[in-house]
Amino acid sequence: MNPYQSPSTVDSSPETLAPPEEQARRYVRRAGAVLFVPAAVNGATIALGAGSFFPVAAIANLAIVAAAFAGVWLFGLQALNVAALMFYGVFGGSLTRQAWLDRMHESLWPLPWAAGVGAIIWLSWMAIFFGLERHDLSVNLAFAALGHLAAAWVYLTVFFGWYRLRRAAVR
């Protein structure tokens, strides 16, 4: 430690890293912020198609997107914790609830990255659906499948983390 360092300086050594829950909160909030962009673009695109109802549609879409963003920002991690505890009730066995939650929090690291991939997929779909006016079911299904693959990256990472935690506890 530097004796001349100001006490107000934040130390970034591994000992001062945030606990798993705070890190997970950051992941959830980053993912929400990343997905806010395509959601706002989608809402604006729909509002533009509303013709004379544009002001009403734009305000309504913006309100919905803002409310969803605020919900994710404020309650996103809590919602994931509730879902994790439901899985814990079925699959947790002799593990402690805190160990189960900590493993989920640690396993959420791909969430912001998957949200980035999801945002690109969503923006690409909008370009094809609204820009090229390709309203084929096959286009929608293809992009939906890609979006679900991006989400699978996250939930499979969480499920595998729980599986490894459970296996380690059994041994």
Image (tube, rainbow, N blue to C red):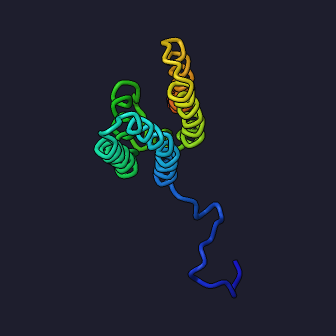
Count of numbered tags:
0
Seen at 55% across and 37% down, the residue is 119
Q: Is residue 114 left or right of residue 99?
A: right
Q: Is residue 52 left or right of residue 162?
A: left
**Nearer to the camera, 102 or 30:** 30
Q: Is residue 70 left or right of residue 19?
A: left
On the image, the x and y values in percent for residue 108 come to: 53, 40
Q: Is residue 2 left or right of residue 67?
A: right
Seen at 48% across and 17% down, the residue is 135
42 up-or-down from 144: above or below? below
On the image, the x and y values in percent for residue 30 come to: 52, 49
166 up-or-down from 111: above or below? above
On the image, the x and y values in percent for residue 138 come to: 53, 12
Seen at 43% across and 41% down, the residue is 44
Of all residues, the one furthest to the front in this rendering is 52
Residue 34 in sight here:
yes
